[in-house]
């Protein structure tokens, strides 16, 4: 990483914010690209209420502390009034990192909602930090999962005409995978699993198709180019190995699909296969669930996606295990209608409960409490100085 440039860009964001923000304004900073903004902004405008939301997974101390700039990053985040994460595990990891580097005290914890605790799921936590103290200040720690606009998705789904897609499929089952071309999304691993399933279950040849949508995130990065090349080479090999004139096992799409068209594929898909190696949340799986107004469909979800903490009624799989991936896919394809509907009903309840509107209200409440804490501390300081 070009750390001097990272600092320069973050300082530019902080300066621009400082110029625009009124006295006591609330500033919401998002994701690791702007790690240093809170610290710079606190120097420029001490009276602001600052919240930072971390959308990507926050690593444990043993991994995060490899960074040469770890103290600079964490000290900046500790300049916030609120530091937010999608899931309790990331909040716990942040606390672990902060305590390894600084004298963080006054730790308050709370039990995690039982609906978000799942036995055996990799990212499950039973409690999470909610408030810490550092350098005479209180910092709220938030674990609040972002969702999707469920009403909007359902409205589009009721208007969507998926029948044409289903007619084209005939009696074939459709597996849908949608994600960015990113090495964390596990695209190649997913295709390799599909190949193993076809090899071990020849009765599926000609009976199932995988629609793999992998949209380039940044065409200027070599790592993404290599990932895209790996996906294309693997898909080509599988199509060449199993395909016929009448049937190709994989349809590979490397461009963005208009949302209304994507909704049609969500509705037509028998299985949504979302298996990233690591993901802060993942909203594709939530869009799939929200779109299934018919109450049908199966979600296969990586246990390393933050969404798995909420959506534990999905078929949960470990993308680092060939056996787990292959068995999850087969289970989804062979699942009885009653089980499909029971799982989907539970998934839809969670997606509706943790919608983007609910997330926004929760974040607003965190801002309100932070502003009240800041006001109370200012009043105490004023009394002491009188």
Image (cartoon, rainbow, N blue to C red):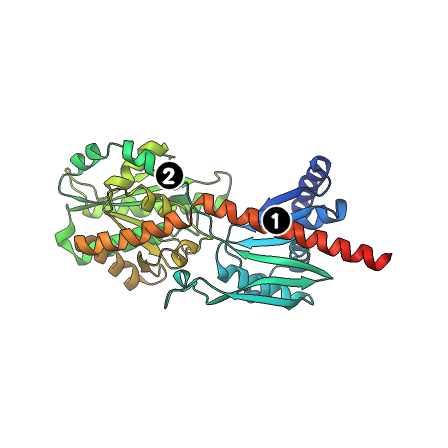
Where's residue 198, x and y in %? 20, 53
Mark pair 1, 2: CA separation: 26 Å
The one nearer the camera, 110 or 301, is 110
Q: Quadrant for the C terminus, please.
A: bottom right
Under circle 2, the secondary element is helix
Q: Residues within 10 Å of mark 2 (few under 14, many from 20)?
A: some
Residue 138's tag is none
Residue 263's quadrant in the figure? top left
Where's residue 302, x and y in %? 36, 56
Where's residue 293, x and y in %? 27, 42
Q: With respect to residue 141, does 46 lie above or below?
A: above
Q: Which residue is mark 2?
A: 151
The one nearer the camera, 194 or 372, is 372
Relative side of 217 to 150, left or right: right
Note whether residue 262 is visible: no
Q: Residues within 10 Å of mark 1 (few under 14, many from 20)?
A: some
Residue 368's tag is 1
x 30%, y 54%: residue: 346
Residue 73's quadrant in the figure? bottom right
């Amino acid at each position: 990483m070009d750390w001097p440039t990272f600092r320069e860009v973050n300082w530019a964001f902080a300066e621009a914010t400082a110029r625009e923000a009124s006295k006591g304004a609330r500033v919401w900073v998002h994701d690791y690209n702007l790690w240093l903004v809170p610290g710079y902004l606190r120097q420029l405008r001490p009276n602001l209420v600052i919240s930072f939301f971390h959308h990507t997974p926050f690593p444990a101390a043993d991994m995060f502390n490899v960074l040469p700039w770890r103290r600079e990053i964490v000290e900046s985040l500790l300049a916030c009034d609120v530091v937010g994460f999608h899931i309790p595990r990331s909040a716990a990891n942040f606390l672990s990192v902060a305590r390894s580097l600084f004298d963080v005290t006054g730790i308050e914890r709370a039990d995690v909602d039982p609906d978000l605790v799942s036995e055996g799921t990799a990212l499950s936590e039973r409690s999470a930090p909610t408030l810490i103290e550092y350098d005479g200040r209180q910092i709220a720690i938030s674990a609040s999962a972002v969702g999707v606009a469920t009403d909007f998705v359902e409205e589009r789904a009721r208007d969507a005409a998926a029948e044409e897609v289903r007619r084209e499929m005939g009696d074939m089952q459709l597996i849908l995978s949608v994600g960015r071309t990113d090495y964390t999304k596990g695209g190649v691993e997913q295709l390799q699993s599909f190949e193993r399933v076809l090899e071990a279950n020849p009765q599926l040849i000609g009976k199932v198709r995988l629609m793999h949508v992998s949209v380039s995130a940044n065409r200027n990065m070599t790592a993404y180019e290599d990932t895209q090349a790996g996906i294309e080479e693997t898909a080509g090999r599988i199509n060449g190995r199993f395909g016929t004139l009448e049937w190709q096992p994989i349809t590979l799409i490397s461009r963005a699909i208009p949302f209304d068209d994507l909704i049609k594929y969500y509705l037509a898909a028998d299985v949504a296969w979302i298996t990233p190696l690591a993901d802060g949340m993942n909203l594709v799986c939530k869009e799939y669930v929200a779109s299934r107004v018919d109450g049908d469909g199966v979600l296969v979800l990586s246990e390393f996606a933050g969404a798995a903490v909420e959506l534990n009624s999905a078929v949960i799989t470990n993308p680092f295990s060939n056996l787990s991936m292959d068995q999850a896919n087969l289970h989804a394809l062979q699942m009885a209608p009653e089980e499909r509907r029971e799982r989907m009903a539970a998934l839809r309840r969670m997606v509706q409960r943790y919608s983007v509107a609910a997330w926004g209200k929760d974040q607003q409440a965190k801002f309100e409490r932070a502003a009240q804490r800041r006001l109370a501390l200012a009043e105490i300081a004023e009394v002491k100085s009188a």
